[in-house]
Amino acid sequence: DQVPVLAIDGPGGAGKGTVSRLIAARLGWHLLDSGALYRLTAQAAVKHDTALDDEPGLARLAETLDVAFLAEDGDARVILEGEDVSLAIRTEEAGERASRVAALPEVRSALLARQRDFRKAPGLVADGRDMGTVVFPRATLKIFLTASAEERARRRLLQLQESGTDASLSSLLKEIQARDARDMQRAVAPLKPAVDAIELDTTELSIPDVVDRIQRLLADLG
Ligand code: C5P
């Protein structure tokens, strides 16, 4: 438990991914994108024709996931069984499948040890839904990032437009609300702030503002 962990949890689209990546780079710490592990498990299921309600089958896939996270020119590549799935796991559909798979207790426990293995010196920034509540309950600092659903839908739309994809704000908002509901209402490791988490509403904050605030909180701990 010596290696420090910064746990950053919150709903999709609150800026966790970007903020976690920037802080990890600044500190020279490792990064755990736990959502990617759920997305990859769902992707492996599609590839191996495993049904999304076959809990033991999915848990086996999660347990044996053959994945590599590569950092190339600051661009993170995700390789599943030798295939670059960086883009494939980022679609709305992949997120939707991930959140179904993530609701299954056997899948979550199959991924637990793998997530904890990311904790290596000099430190870890862990991005997810249950980093501070389940995976690293004794994390050095726990942040719960939020933003209004409307703002998160707007950010997602901009992101999609930048990558040349068209989408409608109202359908994105519906998808975000449906995913929030599933993540918050599931029986195992539901999305909720740890009792000792610091909540940060990013609706009106820029990414650099959020990064600075979290770094200051971390520095204040000494
Ligand atoms: O963060 P991201 O959107 O990549 O996560 C995809 C899905 O994986 C989430 O909607 C959530 O259901 C699930 N997830 C989870 N626990 C985590 C990270 C992600 O249940 N720690």
Image (cartoon, grey):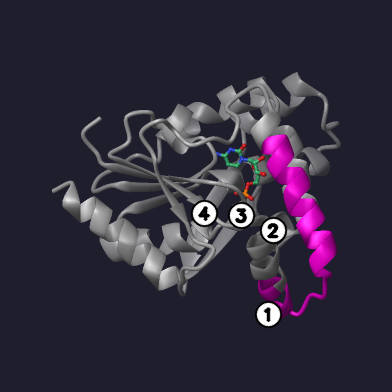
Magenta stretch: give its range. 158-183
Q: Is residue 84 visible?
A: no
| Label drawn at residue 90 | 2
The residue lying at 39 percent from left, 32 percent from top is: 136
Q: Is residue 147 left or right of residue 25?
A: right
Instruction: Tell me which label, 2 or 4, sits earlier in the chain.
Output: 4
| Label drawn at residue 69 | 4
Q: Secondary structure at mark 3?
A: strand
Q: Amino acid at mark 2?
A: Arg
Circles 4 and 1, Cβ within 8 Å, touching? The answer is no
Instruction: Tell me which label, 4 or 3, sits earlier in the chain.
Output: 4
Q: Residues within 10 Å of mark 4 (few under 14, many from 20)?
A: some
Q: Is residue 99 left or right of residue 30?
A: right
Distance between the alpha carbons at the discs numbered 1 and 2: 14 Å
Nearest-to-viewer mark from 1 and 2: 1
The residue lying at 27 percent from left, 39 percent from top is: 140
Camera-nearest residue between 23 and 204 = 204
Circles 2 and 4, Cβ within 8 Å, touching? The answer is no
